[in-house]
Every structure is written in structure tokens, then in C-alpha cells.
């Protein structure tokens, strides 16, 4: 049966100091590029996320987002503090979700080359922290899907060849645009043809654009054979504790039927409940379904 972890993005408003739906993405990207150590202005420090996972939510495994320590990938003293904090709390570090570093497979092949190299430092940081993977983004826009698939596969394989000696998996999440087309993403993984390359299925991230959404359940089912992690995206809950957008019972059945016994991360992204309430509701639902399964 699966275990439960906490995705750092569940606390993104607390960490960023942003109101619901109020993230200024352009400002954030600019600040990360110019003054990354002062770009995060929320009420929670990145290091305290590790403590909160254990003490506030009784969760003993975490998935980081590089945004919240963007300038620290090669800061050995800071990484030591992260590792010491996790060790002292008995928290396992699972993976680093990498954003704002470019996209492997970018049709601009010079940009793609830079994107691949930008991820090297996160592979090294992940290995030091005891993680098993990083998550990268592929698929830029919707044009030329066949060539984008070929380029993405080539770049993922290059990343995997770099990461292999570190024992770090390169995972791709359904995360918008072409990557939210599960059939397309499966084709990319197959073309990459490397044991270190896999998927990170997200229950909710299947919107390809503003009007087209891939079927959630079909998408998760197609991605699961390559999964080395799973994100339990959640938005809201009814009075019985069930998620109101997604059929969690069906999704968990798909995950477990695939033989998956790894971690499923709590990734609350709703507006009505507070972040702590959403995290606890998601965890409780996963625990209930785990018992019933």
C-alpha cells in the first residue's frame, strides 16, 4: 500500500506571502533571476516547511519546490542545514520539483541546452539531500508536437545520463500545455528509453489550454506504468470529506491497480479552505482510502 508525503506547493501562499490566486508570476520570475535569496517574502521560511510537515501534519516525507530555495542549490552550508533539519525531525526528502530553469525539449535548441545544464545543480543537490528524483517541465506551447516529443526525449535522456551516477530519477509531470496530454507524454518517456526517466502523475493537471482538458482518469492510468511518484492534487471537500472536483476513490484505485506502492504526495491547491485545512483534509481522505483498499 502507498505512503503519504507532503508537497511543499501545498503551502505556497504561506511561503510566498500571496493571497489566493494572487501570485505575480512575472515579478516572481524576475526576482528569482536577480535576487533569489530575497524573492520569497511569505510568513514561513523554507527550512520551517520541513519542521511543519512533521509537527503540524504528522507527515514524515516531503517533496520540495526549488522556487523556495532557488539560489541555494550550490550553497553547501544551506543544504547541510536542510539535511540536518530533515534528519532531526525524522523526515525523508523525496524529490525536488524544478521550475524557472527552462524546459528540456524547448524548440529553441540553444535554450533547451541551457535548460538541461541548469538542472545539473539540482540533481547534485537532490542526491546530497537524499532525494530519489527531480521533476522537470517539458512541452512548450502546443505547436509541432511530434518534433517537441523528439527533442524532449533527447534532452531527458541527456539529463538521465548525467543523473545516473547520482542515482537520481528524472520525472516529468503533466503540468500544462503538451505535457498535460498524457498520450503525448507517454510517447516522450518511451522515446527517452532510459530507466532513470519516468512520470509524476498529478491528479488535476490535465488542462492542455483554457478550453481543452484531457480526461483525468484516463491520463493517470496512462501515466502510471512509468510513475516514480504521484501527486494527489486537491481543491475542495464536501461535508463527508470527499474531494469535490475529482473522484479520489477511482483515482486511488487506478494508482494501486498499477502496482504502485510508493509515496502519494498531498498537494492542496484550493481557495476556500486555508492551506492547513486543505492539507489535513487531503491527508485524511488518503488515509481513509488507504484503509479501505
Image (cartoon, helix red, strand yellow):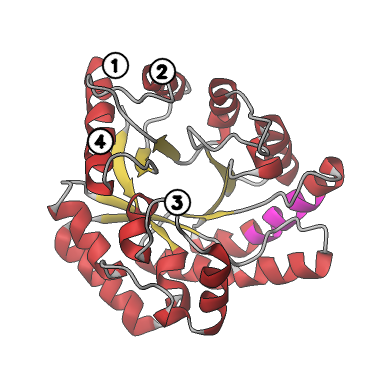
> Which range of residues does the magenta coloring cover?
151-159
Q: Nearer the viewer, residue 88 or 7?
A: 7
Callout 3 environment at 10 Å: few (<14), some (14 to 19), or many (20+)? few
Residue linked to disc 1: 293
Image location of residue 120, percent across then percent down? 58, 70
Label 2 close to label 1 by CB (< 8 Å): yes
How far apart in space, not on screen, are marks 3 and 1 (Cα)? Answer: 35 Å
**Which of the two marks, 4 or 2, is nearer to us in this view?**
4
Camera-side mark, 4 or 1: 4
| For marks 4 and 1 on the same chain, the one whose residue lies earlier in the sequence | 4
Q: Nearer the viewer, mark 2 or mark 3?
A: 3
Per the image, the residue denoted by label 3 is 21
Q: Give whichever of discs 3 and 1 has the lower sequence position.
A: 3
Residue under label 4, please give it: 283
Disc with the residue nearer the chain's start (2 vs 1):
2
Mark 3 secondary-structure assignment: loop
* Residue 198 shown left or right of residue 114 in the figure: left
Task: Choose between 161 and 38: the one closer to the eye.
Answer: 38
- Which label lies toward us, 3 or 1? 3
Percent of width and height locating residue 118: 62, 71
Q: Secondary structure at mark 2?
A: helix
Q: Is residue 92 left or right of residue 230?
A: left
Q: Earlier in the sequence, mark 4 or mark 2?
A: 2
Q: CA distance from mark 4 to mark 1?
A: 15 Å
Q: Which residue is mark 2?
A: 253
Left or right, 54 with respect to 187, comes to left
Q: Which mark is residue 282?
A: none
Residue 205 versus residue 285 in the image, above or below: below
Instruction: Pinpoint residue 83: horizontal percent, then vertical percent.
Output: 28, 69
- Looking at marks 4 and 3 on the same chain, the residue that comes earlier in the sequence is marked by 3
Residues at marks 4 and 3 touching, judged by CB atoms closer than 8 Å: no
Amino acid at each position: 500500500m502507498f505512503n503519504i508525503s507532503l508537497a511543499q506547493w501545498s503551502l505556497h501562499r504561506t511561503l510566498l506571502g500571496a493571497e489566493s490566486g494572487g501570485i505575480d508570476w512575472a515579478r516572481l520570475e524576475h526576482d528569482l533571476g536577480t535576487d533569489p535569496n530575497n524573492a520569497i517574502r511569505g510568513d514561513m521560511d523554507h527550512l520551517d516547511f520541513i519542521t511543519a510537515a512533521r509537527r503540524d501534519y504528522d507527515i514524515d516525507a516531503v517533496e520540495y519546490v526549488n522556487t523556495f530555495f532557488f539560489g541555494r542549490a550550490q550553497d553547501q552550508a544551506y543544504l547541510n542545514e536542510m539535511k540536518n533539519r530533515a534528519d532531526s525531525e525524522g523526515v525523508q526528502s523525496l524529490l525536488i520539483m524544478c521550475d524557472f530553469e527552462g524546459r528540456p525539449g524547448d524548440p529553441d535548441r540553444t535554450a533547451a541546452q541551457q535548460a538541461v545544464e541548469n538542472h545539473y545543480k539540482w540533481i547534485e543537490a537532490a542526491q546530497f539531500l537524499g532525494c530519489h528524483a527531480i521533476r522537470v517541465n517539458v512541452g512548450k506551447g502546443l505547436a509541432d508536437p511530434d518534433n517537441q516529443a523528439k527533442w524532449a526525449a533527447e534532452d531527458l535522456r541527456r539529463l538521465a545520463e548525467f543523473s545516473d551516477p547520482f542515482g537520481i530519477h528524472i520525472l516529468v509531470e503533466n503540468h500544462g500545455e503538451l505535457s498535460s496530454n498524457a498520450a503525448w507524454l507517454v510517447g516522450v518517456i518511451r522515446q527517452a528509453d532510459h530507466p532513470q526517466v519516468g512520470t509524476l502523475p498529478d491528479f488535476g493537471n490535465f488542462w492542455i489550454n483554457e478550453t481543452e482538458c484531457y480526461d483525468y482518469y484516463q491520463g493517470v492510468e496512462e501515466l502510471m506504468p512509468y510513475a516514480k511518484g504521484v501527486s494527489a492534487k486537491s481543491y475542495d471537500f464536501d461535508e463527508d470529506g470527499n474531494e469535490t472536483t475529482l473522484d479520489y476513490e477511482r483515482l486511488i484505485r487506478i494508482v494501486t491497480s498499477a502496482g504502485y506502492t510508493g509515496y502519494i504526495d498531498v498537494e492542496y491547491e484550493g481557495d476556500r479552505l486555508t492551506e492547513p485545512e486543505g492539507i489535513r483534509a487531503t491527508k485524511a481522505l488518503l488515509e481513509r482510502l488507504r484503509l479501505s483498499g
